[in-house]
Image: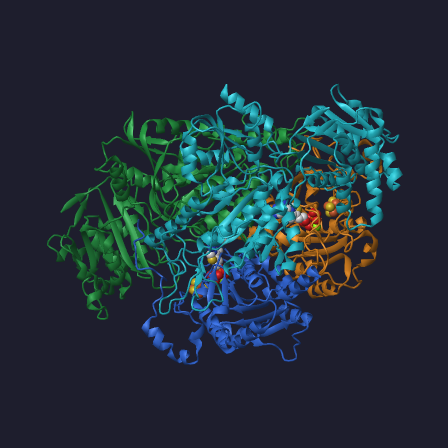
Chain colours: A blue, B orange, C cyan, D green
Amino acid sequence: MNTPKDKPHNTEPVLNKRVASGLSHVNSDGLLNYRSHALPTWCPGCGYYGITHGLTQAMNTLNIPNENLVVVSGIGCAGRMPFFVNGYGFHSIHGRALPIASGVKMASPELTVLCVGGDGDGFGIGGGHIAHVIRRNVDLTYIVFDNSIYGLTKGQASPTTPKGQVTSTSPFGTAEDPINPALISLAYNVSFLATGYAGDPDILNTIFQKALAHRGFSMIIVTTPCITFDHVNVTWNDFRDRFEPIPSGHNTGDIAAAMQLAISGKNYNGVLYQDDRPDWETRQKAIRKKSSG
Amino acid sequence: MNTPKDKPHNTEPVLNKRVASGLSHVNSDGLLNYRSHALPTWCPGCGYYGITHGLTQAMNTLNIPNENLVVVSGIGCAGRMPFFVNGYGFHSIHGRALPIASGVKMASPELTVLCVGGDGDGFGIGGGHIAHVIRRNVDLTYIVFDNSIYGLTKGQASPTTPKGQVTSTSPFGTAEDPINPALISLAYNVSFLATGYAGDPDILNTIFQKALAHRGFSMIIVTTPCITFDHVNVTWNDFRDRFEPIPSGHNTGDIAAAMQLAISGKNYNGVLYQDDRPDWETRQKAIRKKSSG
Amino acid sequence: MKQTDSLVIKICGSAGDGAISAVEILNRACALMGFHIMNFDSYPAEIRGFGKSVGHTRISRTPLLTPGRYADCLVALNDMHAITELKRIKPDAALVYDSRPPDYIEEDCAVAGFIEPGMSGYGVPLRELSAQAVKSARSRNIVALGAIAAMYNLDPEAFIEAINIRFARKSAVVREINSAALKMGYEYIRNHRERPVHKTLLAVKRHDRPIRIVNGNEAAAIGALDAGLTLYAGYPITPATKIMEYLAKKLPPKNGTVVQTEDEIAAIGHVVGAGYTGKRAMTATSGPGLCLMTEMLNLAVQAEIACVVINSMRGGPSTGLPTKTEQADLNLALYGGSGDSPRVVLAPANVPECYIMTRRAFEIAEAFQTPVILLLDFFLSNRFEDVDETVLETFEPGMFKRLTAEPVSGKPFERFRVTDNGVSPAAFPGMPGLKHAITGLEHTPRGFPNYEGDNHRAMTEKRRRKFIELQNAWPHPDVTGPKGQLSIGVLSWGSSIGAVREALASPELKGLSIGGCFPRLLQPLQTEPLKLFANRCDRLVVVELNSSGQLAGLIEQTTHKKAMRLADVPAEPPAVEQIVRYLTGVLK
Amino acid sequence: MKQTDSLVIKICGSAGDGAISAVEILNRACALMGFHIMNFDSYPAEIRGFGKSVGHTRISRTPLLTPGRYADCLVALNDMHAITELKRIKPDAALVYDSRPPDYIEEDCAVAGFIEPGMSGYGVPLRELSAQAVKSARSRNIVALGAIAAMYNLDPEAFIEAINIRFARKSAVVREINSAALKMGYEYIRNHRERPVHKTLLAVKRHDRPIRIVNGNEAAAIGALDAGLTLYAGYPITPATKIMEYLAKKLPPKNGTVVQTEDEIAAIGHVVGAGYTGKRAMTATSGPGLCLMTEMLNLAVQAEIACVVINSMRGGPSTGLPTKTEQADLNLALYGGSGDSPRVVLAPANVPECYIMTRRAFEIAEAFQTPVILLLDFFLSNRFEDVDETVLETFEPGMFKRLTAEPVSGKPFERFRVTDNGVSPAAFPGMPGLKHAITGLEHTPRGFPNYEGDNHRAMTEKRRRKFIELQNAWPHPDVTGPKGQLSIGVLSWGSSIGAVREALASPELKGLSIGGCFPRLLQPLQTEPLKLFANRCDRLVVVELNSSGQLAGLIEQTTHKKAMRLADVPAEPPAVEQIVRYLTGVLK
Ligand SMILES: Cc1ncc(C[n+]2csc(CCOP(=O)(O)OP(=O)(O)O)c2C)c(N)n1
Ligand SMILES: Cc1ncc(C[n+]2csc(CCOP(=O)(O)OP(=O)(O)O)c2C)c(N)n1
Ligand code: SF4
Ligand code: SF4
Ligand SMILES: [Mg+2]
Ligand SMILES: [Mg+2]
């Protein structure tokens, strides 16, 4: 009875005037084309704004028809993304964005399907699905917002939290080793892998463009700060210095070389690996042909 | 009403006299020490007998107290193992042997906990758990019976079925690329990894001994034929030729080298990787100390 | 020589003896002659090669409700296994056995030694005749079929036609030598016995329409195909796997996709994703898999997405009895979800209904934007019935229709508009002017997250309201028996309905003041007709294959009347005899 | 100046204004003075920093059943937010506001402009006084607390003690300047108002026993600790996360382990694994997580493993309303599993019961070798109550005890022996002479897979029989109200019981022929006492926070009597006023 009927949070969107005018220069770039009228509910200063910025730019450049765009997400702060994109959106359940997005694409291959979610959503509860979307090579673009923390549930450890970090569920430091999601995706034999960070939306923009153009499953792991619940691991301060461009001469067609980069301990900004094996729909066409022959 | 009350299958065990006498030489090796009185329900000729043989030998050598031995399994032909081992056994549910085994070991660290299951159980429905047991480095020995098929449900494709193989759910050949479980485990940063095959129980014996002695999570992927439902991929015929010993000079402490072996396209019989980072219990002890300090 | 309306035949052997395939030919031959059949085999539970297989079929002039329990004729292809079947034969049964068995069968293991007074032994040199015909003992099963033809006055030509169909893809030689084997068995009985005929099955007219012999799994799969399935996503599990295996063959030629997912969560995830784009998608599973799907089904309820799930029940709980039948997942289907999570639950009673209700399920799912769970069970999934093809062809689609939105310029689209009947016009990705986002969070009519009480209440009510229309439009439960006040009203559901109807028609109960009521729509339950029925009954009895009386509880909630429970878990289909006995007991 | 038994105070601000922590100090001070308190704050649903926080507490001479809905006193630390709270105050409420607000607050946004006749405005220069005391506006909340002390005649020394406790780990300076802030607020009211006192809370004796202020989550966590928890495995989810966060601090020093798993399936998997070795293990989750646990819970039923699951309910279905309260997971808890899958479901009604019933849950789980689900909800998990430490200390363990097997030489161990009460002596890994394997398949008494009907029936019955003993041993549901025939019998469960009891004790209903019946054990339901109660009632009304009436359905099944449903989903705790109104309506 203490939860009074207050003004609804995050309800029918109000385009706050000040923000709108502040965004007018953005609008002149046509960026608002892919922004919905709902204002993001993320904390001011969250890295997710940078990722969104890069993404809207990429979509703007590729000029994807809005009504053919579907953004599927799981649950988490990152999962709120579909509300902020001007297209069709599906804010689903925790950890299951990939199977749902796969179903969307398999049933309606003409759609452009984007899948977004946090590190907990993707590598914790949803971790079992990644290998299999990769095996099928479903033509999805999957962006992981990796802040190495559970943001929405207020700061618990995630699979990418460094060992020993104090979080709300690990007051004496975590006991688990973190995973290396780039290496794992390569071991799964992903057909497109890029890494990047929220502090450089322009590079993200170029990465996202490549990923969206890739026919098959593309995975982009974006490191991003949770300014509210992580004050030690990923912060804006030391962030920029951690990332470097992909070494010149790196052959993105060489998976062993990509794995080398992934275990180097360094953080790269760009595409680590890409090949052009047939995507799911192409494979299905072959099966359909065989089946009727 | 057509399922008459027949003689119970696989019910209270009867030690078939002929089999018992045939096993007498085995008994003289003390092997029956780790065999239960229940006769395996596997098809005659199944590779699982070989694995069981290697395992009983290993346990015999290590002389593990039977009452401290716990075998946890999922569901599948492989999952029946606990009934055939002379110890405590938990035939659980499909894909969840690892979390259950972890719970067993965390709550009762004095037990020797073995986890067994098929490729579908482990890499399909259960695939999401492996990375996290590895992150915790729980002191379990996990043996995957990899026949690249769903045996118990009569021959559907599994995550290790080669692309294009005809199975009961892929009459026109599978569309998915198979996974490389050894490479994936290494990418998860497993603390012990070995591969082997059912046709050489003696090598399996030595591998299992090392795995059981390893303090931390050890994973052994055993290739084995399903003689009933796979007549093309893993068969006794071409089997022996596929495996070779670990190259001499391989440094089992070098994870990059182990990954090289795993992507070489060859099949090895032996330990690919091992390190000695602290296991879960050791990590917990540190946390407990900190927490009371 | 007795005349009979229906005949139960069991052919029993080890795996590999051809018991099951002999019954397949027998079914086909009988269907060609114009008989109805109902066939429910039993296989060994373990994979290994030496378990017992029992082909069990019932042949009848009139449509069948159950496959019967006790055999008129038992054929022993393996004596040891046949002995264990002797408790499931009638006192006057015929036993067909190999009259010249190989030496290694020990005396006390020969089934012929168990022939009791009243029974008729039909010794046939099965092995020898087979060897004569096909140069091996492999066609003993076919020789036995020939004997059956003679014993029941059945036209051997129909059997030969059935053999030709069965071996259509084999060489002409195979067809010929097997036909020869059949004739040998037939002639052997005719020539070596004074009274060759055991019982006469009253003759029937041949069907003038094409007949298919299908089981519940196939019927449901065909229903899905005919409904225009786009995507099937599934994970293998007994007894549902065959649906996927069937569709894996038949869906790709129709430009659809079958995907075997990594687990059941992914399976229902794919289905929900496809449903969200407006396409027809389905999965099939059994209890343990349905458990894993509950979270996603809840999402489909909250986000109002059409999807169809077949759950073929087996013995439980947990892995339970994977190859035995049971009806204990009703509660899970009704209530397996957090929050107020109404979903539609349908339970077909027989094979043709598996077809019809699967097709209808897609319409319901789309029209009411909801998950629909179809409850089959091991028995229904695996029992074969003759199905008149016209049943399939005369299905009239369009009982329920999807409401699709039109963009109204200047007005934001309300995907979840609160309407009188709770149904909001839907829109799908690709449609211009109707873009929106959906969510598993509670949301406003436009789909934005909202946590206010008034909105939540309105939306919760809206989601429940959708089912009132369905409740009204769906045909009322079958009600049988005398009009007026009844001593007992018997309710049942799903595959148990057949046994109950057969019991009510039995000589022991016929004419008594007992009625039946058989709902197919289990959620939303059709309250009014059920109350009407209950009010006519002094006592209610609910017959179902579970131990707590799951439908019984639902009936009590709905009618506020005590329901007696004939709720049993025999690990096999319900026995007509048990139902008769129970009801007789209640009347006393 | 009115005298009152209880007082509802709301302190409203933006996140960061300290509304919640002021209420914390207020609670502590009142508990020190000997009052009872019940506190239920509301936080913004989104993470971002500018949502509304409302600290809400009720202070009373007598034990409290609800935190009350309408405030006697509203403190505005943020005017804009406070305005939206005005609909939740009493007509004679006091409003404490900043009498010298900063310039940037626009005229029509000042809360003082909304003071209606009957209300009392208490303008206090909160900002200024805070600046004087602590050199910043940061302690406006403490100044306001001082005002409250004066307005309700409360001892300021108790507040200072509470401040000292609250800032115990801060420097002495912090404690001093905040005490100064408090005194300034206190003195300001005393010196600047003719009639400083708004209402007088009748004085009480100070408690002579130590008092803790805990919420339901903490109480359950402490209960688990005191029960000797070995392993907690969990996955974060609102409103259960705090249980894990609490145990992560407190369990390691007791040599236990907390593991944050990759998902809820793994969480319950760890718990079942630990339970299988005979150790006490627990997980806590909410609806979506419970969905994912159903398959594993079924395994625990079939393999008879002790485990405890706390499910704190939130609005549903699906992700639903994560930060709002509801009681709609009852069906899932009761029935969320395939097959016949009986499990124990308990629902505590208040904070001390969260402690007691969690401890008891471990005993039940072990004694009956079964999963136990405890149903809390957002309201109960997050509401603070004063708990007499003796409640915790006087808990008597051993109401139910585990039966452990002894090896009998020469006799194979029957882990699942069929016994009269369904309980078989248990054995755990490490015990010599009792080795065995367990399985989720149906099994014989020795634990070997078996698919026969007779065995399955016997085992199914055995598993159900266990609960008869529990049903008998568990205290009967609380029954309140007059003896004899009743016009209305009201039933309720869990955190709604408080509101119903308060409603029944209200002046409007007191003395009428209405009784209450409040079960805590929801599965197995205690059939006999419930029937007895139902038979005494002309009408049954079930009050619960869900829309279909989940307990109501259960009551109808059990009593065969219609249950009227006051089943609502207001996204907040039930309103006493609504219950009174409803019952009055029924009586008319
Ligand atoms: C089945 C289920 N379990 C748990 C939750 C609670 N939950 C919501 S979001 C979340 C984790 C969020 O972390 P992440 O995926 O990293 O996203 P972020 O908030 O950091 O963007 C959890 C555990 C849930 N909604 N559903
Ligand atoms: C939740 C659930 N889904 C599906 C099944 C059915 N099932 C039993 S075993 C199995 C796969 C067996 O394959 P694998 O793990 O490779 O073991 P194998 O039989 O080959 O040894 C499946 C799908 C189940 N028991 N539970
Ligand atoms: S909690 Fe962290 S991840 Fe979530 S919106 Fe705030 S800063 Fe971003
Ligand atoms: S089916 Fe295959 S895996 Fe299973 S027991 Fe037989 S041979 Fe072995
Ligand atoms: Mg995160
Ligand atoms: Mg396998």
Residue D394 in sight = no
Taking the image as shown, residue B180 lies to the left or right of residue C193, namely left
Write the residue at 47% across / 51% down: C400
- Vertical comparison of A39 with C191: above or below: below
- Vertical comparison of B18 with A177: above or below: above
Residue D460 in sight = yes
Taking the image as shown, residue C42 lies to the left or right of residue D515, namely right
Taking the image as shown, residue D149 lies to the left or right of residue D422, namely left
- Vertical comparison of C409 with B92: above or below: below
Q: Quadrant of the C terminus of chain D?
A: top left
Taking the image as shown, residue D278 lies to the left or right of residue A51, namely right
Which residue is at the front of the view, A79 or C572? C572
Residue B92 lies, in percent from the top left, at 62, 43
Residue C339 lies, in percent from the top left, at 43, 47
Write the residue at 85% across / 27% down: C192
Which residue is at the front of the view, C230 or A15? C230
Number of callouts: 0
Q: Residue furthest left?
A: D194
Residue A282 lies, in percent from the top left, at 64, 66
On the image, which quarter does residue C14 sit in?
top right
Residue A280 lies, in percent from the top left, at 63, 64
